[in-house]
Image (tube, helix red, strand yellow):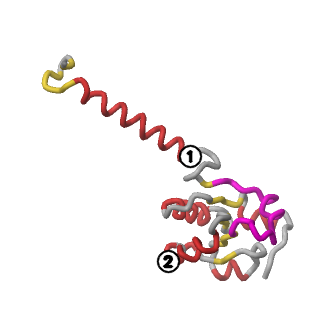
Amino acid sequence: MTLPNQPDRPRSASLILPGLLLSLTLLALSACSPGGPGSIRAVSQAEVSESLGDAGAPLLLDVRTPREFQSGHIPGAVHIPDTEILARLDEVRRESADRGVIIYCESGGRALRTASTLLDQGFTNVGHLDGDMLAWRQAGLPTAP
């Protein structure tokens, strides 16, 4: 069977493109769903504050510069600057095994880029601290030197 104005093209071939577009759209939507695998979960300041010191709590990953980290960080956070994340993926995998990772920076940009990098590298339980370190300090929550 042929379509009008396309005498040499079978009808089945004209159905491939719309089907492919639908599949890609559904894939993109599922990747953006909140909290699902392959997405960055928003984590509240309260959730992190309440889990400080818990052995099974997610790894807190501070991706700021060494100077920023030394000026004060969330107690128990592991410091890996965003510029070193790819070189230190094994360390992140080891530290976050079975508990996931929550990433923060000063205001969000570096943390979200790092979270996306981790997702690209196969991590599935990735969170981002709402408001990052800026909001943490403004809320008067505990910091370590």
Q: Amino acid at mark 1?
A: Cys
- Residue drawn 32% across and 33% down? 17
Q: Position of residue 40 (x, y in %)?
A: 61, 55
- Count of numbered circles on the image: 2
Is residue 143 a member of the stretch shown in magenta? no
Q: Position of residue 42 (x, y in %)?
A: 68, 54
Characterize the local packing of mark 2: few (<14), some (14-19) or many (20 or more) Cα atoms within 10 angstroms: few
The magenta region covers 41-59
Q: CA distance from mark 1 to mark 2?
A: 27 Å
Q: Nearer the viewer, residue 16 or 56?
A: 56
Residue denoted by label 2: 87
Q: Nearer the viewer, residue 32 or 107?
A: 32
Q: Which mark is residue 32?
A: 1
* Image quarter in which the C terminus is found: bottom right
* Image quarter in which the N terminus is found: top left
- Left or right of residue 21: residue 50: right
Q: For mark 2, give the secondary structure.
A: helix
Q: For mark 1, give the secondary structure.
A: loop
Q: Nearer the viewer, residue 51 or 40?
A: 51
Q: Position of residue 3 (x, y in %)?
A: 21, 19
- Residue drawn 67% across and 64% down? 99
